Image (cartoon, rainbow, N blue to C red):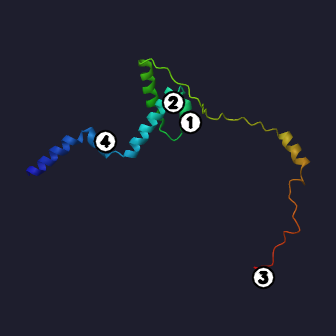
Amino acid sequence: MTARLLLLAMVLTLGGCDAVTALLADPKVAQRIADSKAIGSACRHGMRSIEDCYALNEKASKAAMFDGWKEMDQYMRDNKIEGIVSAKSDKPPQPVEEIIDEKAADRTAKDKPAASKPKPKSSDKPADKAAH
């Protein structure tokens, strides 16, 4: 009876403890969140906008990346730290607008009807099956 009461008291005491939930958490998830926060911090220190940071790091958690960016922004403001412009600017590629002219496409299709078809060679005859 005493063992049951002791077990019940221990479960109720540890039920509200944050350390127990931290021990049960997946370490890969915690590492991914920490990496995303570090990416956000590096983007802010490198004077990149949060949108560019999202575009360059699509696999990272956006919420954690924003938290890291925001923390670094506050830290830089408090300590009057200027950002560093990266030597290699990896801006995400801008979407290219493709203009399709239907009249020009029709003209090129009419000009090259026979040129687009390959001509069969006489030397490409199937080999005799008995030779194999």
Between discs 2 and 3, the one toward the N terminus: 2
Residue 51's spot in the image, x, y percent?
A: 55, 30
- Residue 69 versus residue 109 in the image, above or below: above
Q: Whole-Å distance between the Cαs marked 2 and 4? A: 28 Å
Numbered disc 1: secondary structure? helix
Q: Amino acid at mark 1?
A: Leu
- Residue 2 versus residue 69 in the image, above or below: below
Residue under numbered circle 1: 56
Between discs 2 and 4, the one toward the N terminus: 4
Residue under numbered circle 4: 22
Q: Residue at x 54, y 39 (%)?
A: 58
Query: Of circles 2 and 4, which is in front?
Result: 2
Q: Whole-Å distance between the Cαs marked 2 and 3? A: 68 Å
Between discs 1 and 3, the one toward the N terminus: 1
Query: Would residue 116 appear left or right of 30 to someone viewing this image?
Result: right
- Crowding near pointer 1: few (<14 within 10 Å), some, many (20+)? some
| Circles 1 and 3: CB atoms closer than 8 Å | no
Kindly identify which numbered label has been placed on residue 43.
2
Residue 10's spot in the image, x, y percent?
A: 17, 44
Between discs 3 and 4, the one toward the N terminus: 4
In which quarter of the view is residue 125 placed? bottom right
How many numbered circles are shown?
A: 4
Can residue 63 be seen in the rendering of this structure? no
Nearer to the camera, 99 or 76: 76
Between discs 4 and 1, the one toward the N terminus: 4
Q: Whole-Å distance between the Cαs marked 2 and 1? A: 10 Å
Q: Whole-Å distance between the Cαs marked 4 and 1? A: 30 Å
Quadrant containing the C terminus in the rendered view = bottom right
